[in-house]
Amino acid sequence: MPEKIRLGIIGGGGDSLIGVLHRVASFINDNYEIVGAVFNADHEQSLSFARQIDIPTNRIYRDFDTLIEEEMKLLPSERIQVCSVLTPNFLHFPMAKKLLDNGFHVICEKPMTTTLGEARLLQKAHEKAGTVFALTHTYTGYPMVRQMREMIRAGELGKIHKVDARYYQGWINSVIHDPEERSRVWRLNPKKAGISSCMGDIGVHAFNMVEYTTGLQVKSLLCDFNYLYDDNQMDVDGTVLIRLGQHVKGVIRSSQVATGEENGLAISIYGDKAALRWEQERPNFLYKITDTDPVRIYKPGHAYNSKLSLDGTKLPPGHPEGIFDAMANIYLGAARAIRGEDYNDGEFPTMTDGVRGMTFIEATVASHKAGNVWVDMD
Ligand SMILES: NC(=O)c1ccc[n+]([C@@H]2O[C@H](COP(=O)([O-])OP(=O)(O)OC[C@H]3O[C@@H](n4cnc5c(N)ncnc54)[C@H](O)[C@@H]3O)[C@@H](O)[C@H]2O)c1
């Protein structure tokens, strides 16, 4: 077994949603060891969480800048090699940039930045650093999403003509109707979330899934947002018509006020020979449908799956793997890249996906604000 990769964590404290997913994912394939962190903005909270999860507190730093300063004093053989940035959106850019500028590898949460301008600056910093940058669009780590991508690449759907991606949640219903409650949610605060709530938080996952599975790029889009209230600055629902080519069209539907919906990400890709359909809440089933044959259901771990899909499965068929395993697959790909080993294209989303995501978010806002007009993604 090669030496563990020394991992630092920024954000993702005990009070966070995403922290546990990254910590567990980093352990799953035995590649990483958490050696340093700033789990929370509040140092005492950070220290107490480190004690709770049994991580030595000598490298639990007061804040992010101190982490960089102190780690740079250590020998490269002791220093943190890669940092996961799990803070609210507005901190991704300054933190990821400083990490890259100091030669660290970075695993960063989405959306990559809060503006396209920042995304481009980060891309330049990454080119200069030459280190690994992985963006955690978690759903690309599911074996059946990888299978979908490989089947489309192999031409099993024929010529693609229609794509439909949907990401529906309902949780903002519990806060959106009360301005006081609303003001406490960082996802509804443009200073912390960026220019979009719904499209920036979840629509961008659906967009990423469209480009990841089809291998096509969205060329232009038309977006219609719903803010629900005049005094709410952030979209909580949006429908986006997309064009991926002259005769390849589709829709991305995204909502945080779809009452009763939990984490309803679903994608269907239709070609002239067949179609594929996948849903996040039933991630181990990939449906192939045609106009002529009975429905085919693909499941993980079977030899009929592609190499990329099988690489993301650890247990024999019938042992359900889920979101922790999907994230673990992204960490596995990043570990291979950090160690300079061979890895498959598609093992983890990259800087390019981050720039595409920010282009998408800005284009949706521009389209809506200009009166729901077509906007180029180039
Ligand atoms: N990949 C996914 O599917 C997915 C899912 C959920 C969230 N996310 C992303 O993860 C990020 C975090 O989301 P969340 O829901 O966990 O947020 P959260 O509000 O639940 O947690 C944020 C954490 O960051 C910490 N933090 C805030 N400021 C900090 C600072 N200056 N230094 C150190 N720590 C600080 C907070 O204390 C908290 O522990 C967001 O960018 C979000 O878009 C991604």
Image (cartoon, rainbow, N blue to C red):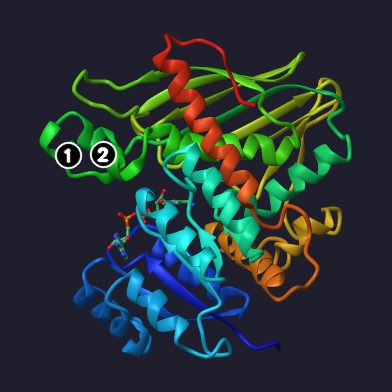
Q: Is residue 150 left or right of residue 360?
A: right
Q: Residue 189 carries which label?
A: 2
Residue 280 seen in the current view? no
**Label located before the other in sequence (1 or 2):** 1
Q: Is residue 144 left or right of residue 36?
A: right
How packed mark 1 is, by other alpha carbons closer than 10 Å (few <14, some 14-19, many 20 or more), is some
The quarter of the picture where residue 227 lies is top left
User: What residue do we see at 51% from left, 80% from top?
Assistant: 80
Name the residue nearer the viewer: 198 or 128: 128
Q: In this view, does 225 lie to the left or right of 319?
A: left
Q: Which mark is residue 183?
A: 1
- The secondary structure type at the circle numbered 1 is loop
Ligand 1 image-quadrant field = bottom left
Tags 1 and 2 touching, CB below 8 Å: yes
Q: Give, as a three-letter code, the residue at label 2.
A: Asn
User: What residue do we see at 31% from left, 39% from top?
Assistant: 171
Name the residue nearer the viewer: 155 or 10: 10
- Give the Cα distance between marks 1 and 2: 7 Å
Looking at the image, residue 222 lies above or below residue 100: above
- The secondary structure type at the circle numbered 2 is loop
> In the rendering, at what x and y percent does residue 157 appear?
83, 30
How packed mark 2 is, by other alpha carbons closer than 10 Å (few <14, some 14-19, many 20 or more), is some
Looking at the image, residue 58 lies above or below residue 93: below
> In the rendering, at what x and y percent does residue 233 appear?
26, 27
User: What residue do we see at 48% from left, 29% from top?
Assistant: 362
Q: Give, as a three-letter code, the residue at label 1.
A: Ser
Residue 175 seen in the current view? yes
